[in-house]
Image (cartoon, helix red, strand yellow):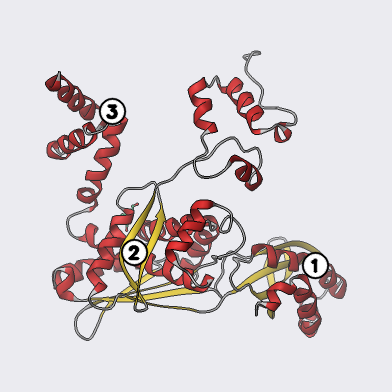
Amino acid sequence: MDTHAPSSRIGGFHKFNVAERIDSVAKFAQLDDADKALLRNTGNLPAELADHLIENFIGTMNIPVGIATNMKIDGQDRLIPMATEESSVVAAVCNAARQCYDNGGFVTSMSGTEMIAQIQLTQVPDPQHARLQILERKEAVRDMCNACDPILVKLGGGFRDLEVRVLDTRGGTMVVTHLIVDTRDAMGANAVNTMAERIAPHIAEWTQGKSNLRILSNLADRRLARARCTWRLADIGGAEVRDAMLAAYHFAEADPYRAATHNKGIMNGISAVVMATGNDTRAVEAGAHAYAARSGRYSSLTAWEVSAEGDLVGSIEVPMAVGLVGGATKLHPSAKVALKILNAKAAEDLARVIAAVGLAQNFSAMKALATTGIQKGHMSLHSQNIAMMAGALGEEIDLVARALVELGTVRLDVAEEALQRIRTSKA
Ligand code: MEV
């Protein structure tokens, strides 16, 4: 054992100021002055603000924000900011949107803006009896929930309904209460978690059970965003392309191995907008994947069919717990500008736009995969990344990238050789 190895036990790290934390990490990891300067450069997110968003803050991580163009949603043209580090994601949305723009673009809707909070009760002597005891007190639960958040109630939200489920588990029978709350323009985690914590002791007392977890469910299936779109046969390259895309969809529908990748592509689009607007990517991702498995078998989040006219029709339905207030949405400067660009009038509007982006992403991924393959489109941007990794600067980046595409080999060693050749020929 190396007795001189630095220790991760740094007492009071959270009480240090940012400079002290950076120094402490630099000592641990032998960071040099350039590394420290990078950490101190927090871009457009002021260090004082970031220090209040998370614990033990030392720096920021910039992710490119691109704009998806060509999007027409419910008859309105929208520009959509997307934060992603992955090449081809923004281009995919633009391409899909271009191919349906003249046919009217996307039509969207939403099932509601209700979130679910769960209260777990264990050791309930008579679970079925307890279930009714809780349901009988719906009015009392409503009043207690609404008293937790009078502003939400004033804005038209608040308690909507009560559900009680009796679950048989390996750890015995449990009684699980769902508080169903309309959280309007907030994602709603804080609102419903507060309510669950407030109600739980009462429920435990009424039923003589023991209250345990009190937390929202990310399977936000009362907050489903829906989008549909028709791509005309002539706009997508004909029946052969359409049928190859349908075969791709049927594959995803039938096989969880393929569905995971198919849905990952959809989430490339969805998470990028969720991230750009300062919303919780993990909440939306968890909800999407849980919803994709709701039949008991994990499957596609989208559905693809052929219309009476022979056109390709796509639809998506996905839980979308996003807000315009709360979290980083109103704090992060980039999120604030993103929301301005989007001009979202309500959380519901944002959620619907995001569903359309997910559908567009899926269209392009399936089309590329079912025709030329994904690498062709990927390669031109990916080759630029590799060129930069090889050390190319300024105009060298494009020159090296082009050489890689021409050679048909996008590898770091090939990029290094190409860069060397370019520099030698210039010297
Ligand atoms: C890559 O990030 C996403 C895809 O794999 C999606 C898909 O396979 O449908 C291209």
Tell me if label 2 and label 3 are in contact, CB under 8 Å. no
Tell me if label 1 and label 3 are in contact, CB under 8 Å. no
Measured from the top left, where is residue 248 in percent x and y? 27, 64
Which residue: 43% across, 45% down? 63
Q: CA distance from mark 1 to mark 2?
A: 43 Å
Residue at numbered disc 3: 390
Query: Disc 1, ligand 1: is the CB inside 8 Å?
Result: no
Residue 39 image label? none
Which residue: 41% across, 66% down? 299
Residue 198 image label? 1
Q: Nearer the viewer, residue 255 or 377?
A: 377
Q: Quadrant of residue 215?
A: bottom right
Q: Quadrant of ligand 1?
A: bottom left
User: Does residue 256 appear in this view?
Assistant: no
Measured from the top left, where is residue 226 in percent x and y? 43, 75
Where the N terminus falls, by quadrant?
Answer: top right
Q: CA distance from mark 2 to mark 3?
A: 37 Å
Tell me if label 1 and label 2 are in contact, CB under 8 Å. no
- Specify whether 261 is left or right of 327: left
Other residues around mark 2 within 10 Å, as few (<14) / some (14–19) / many (≥20): many
- Specify whether 48 is left or right of 357: right
Of circles 1 and 3, the one toward us is 3
* Amino acid type indicated by mark 3: Ala
Residue 355 in the image: above or below residue 131:
above
Give SS at disc 1. Answer: helix
Q: CA distance from mark 1 to mark 3?
A: 57 Å
Measured from the top left, where is residue 125 in percent x and y? 83, 72
* Amino acid type indicated by mark 1: Arg
Q: Quadrant of residue 235?
A: bottom left
Query: Disc 2, ligand 1: is the CB inside 8 Å?
Result: yes
Sequence order check, earlier mark of 1 and 3 = 1
Q: Nearer the viewer, residue 95 or 213?
A: 95
